[in-house]
């Protein structure tokens, strides 16, 4: 049985139950409520959530008011440590929304701390945001959903961009170069069954390290 380390908020659990319904062999270990040992895991899933706490950002924050006030430093510390350990073990990594931002920070990157136009209510659960995608990308999507006010600024070490928002070039998908599998997306594939191939790809990479 593949074991996946993660941290999932209660309000997001239903989405990830559905996303992994086609993979009943996978056991998600939620560090929010249980002890998780990365060395015993087969993959790492970084999910959405509040902004990364200011103490972990690798950049000045001129206006702290742009950061969400419900940052969870305990979660951030666990996810940073888990990501570093997973990279050392060369585990498959799938990072979503806030998870993509945290993955970038772990690799030495920075964030755009407040962007417009990517969190309108109608964008949250509908695939309306058009992308332009590199022809070399394994997963090429014409449109995605969107729900975020921060985004990637300077790329972390070793990351390659695969897709951008067509209207403003916000980075929406990237991968870690020369690594077995590390996919990071700014959109929310757990909210729509059309993204099932991304989860299937992630699951298929487990046990191959």
Image (cartoon, helix red, strand yellow):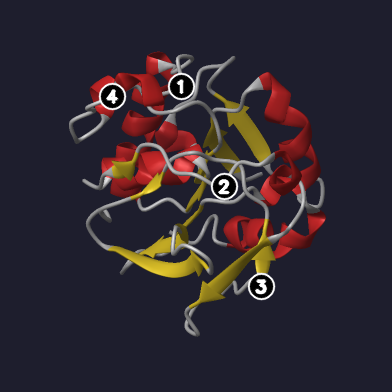
Q: Earlier in the sequence, mark 4 or mark 2?
A: 4
Vertical position of residue 62 compared to residue 58: above or below: above
Label 1 SS: loop
Q: Which quarter shows the C terminus? A: bottom left
Label 2 SS: loop
Q: Which quarter shows the N terminus? A: top right
- Residue at numbered disc 2: 118
Q: Exactly how many numbered labels are in the figure?
A: 4
Label 4 SS: loop
Which residue is rendered at x = 40% and y = 43% of the image? 101
Q: Earlier in the sequence, mark 1 or mark 4?
A: 4
Q: Earlier in the sequence, mark 1 or mark 2?
A: 1
Q: Position of residue 165 (x, y in %)?
A: 52, 64
Question: Residue 160 vs residue 132: left or right?
Answer: left
- Residue at numbered disc 1: 68
Q: Position of residue 154 (x, y in %)?
A: 25, 53
Which residue is rendered at x = 54% and y = 33% of the image? 6
Task: Find out whether the residues at labels 1 and 3 contact each other: C-beta distance under 8 Å.
Answer: no
Query: Distance of mark 3 from mark 4, alpha carbons?
Result: 35 Å
Query: Distance of mark 1 from mark 2, alpha carbons?
Result: 15 Å
Q: Earlier in the sequence, mark 3 or mark 4?
A: 4
Question: Residue 36 vs residue 142: left or right?
Answer: left
- Residue at numbered disc 3: 142
- Residue at numbered disc 4: 63
Q: Position of residue 141 (x, y in %)?
A: 64, 71
Question: Residue 33 vs residue 171: left or right?
Answer: right
């Amino acid at each position: 049985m593949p074991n996946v380390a993660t941290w999932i908020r209660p309000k997001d659990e239903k989405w990830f139950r559905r996303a992994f319904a086609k993979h009943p062999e996978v056991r998600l270990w939620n560090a929010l409520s249980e002890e998780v040992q990365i060395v015993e895991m087969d993959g790492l899933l970084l999910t959405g959530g509040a902004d990364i706490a200011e103490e972990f950002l690798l950049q000045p924050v001129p206006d702290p008011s742009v950061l969400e006030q419900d940052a969870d430093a305990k979660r951030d510390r666990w996810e940073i440590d888990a990501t570093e350990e997973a990279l050392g073990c060369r585990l498959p990594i799938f990072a979503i929304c806030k998870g993509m931002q945290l993955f970038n920070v772990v690799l030495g990157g920075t964030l755009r701390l407040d962007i417009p136009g990517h969190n309108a209510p109608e964008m949250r659960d509908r695939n309306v945001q058009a992308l332009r995608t590199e022809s070399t990308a394994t997963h090429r999507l014409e449109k995605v959903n969107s729900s975020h006010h921060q985004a990637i600024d300077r790329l972390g070490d070793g990351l390659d961009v695969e897709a951008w928002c067509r209207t403003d070039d916000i980075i929406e998908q990237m991968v870690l170069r020369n690594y077995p599998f590390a996919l990071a997306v700014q959109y929310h594939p757990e909210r729509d069954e059309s993204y099932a191939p991304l989860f299937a790809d992630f699951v298929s990479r487990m046990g191959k390290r």
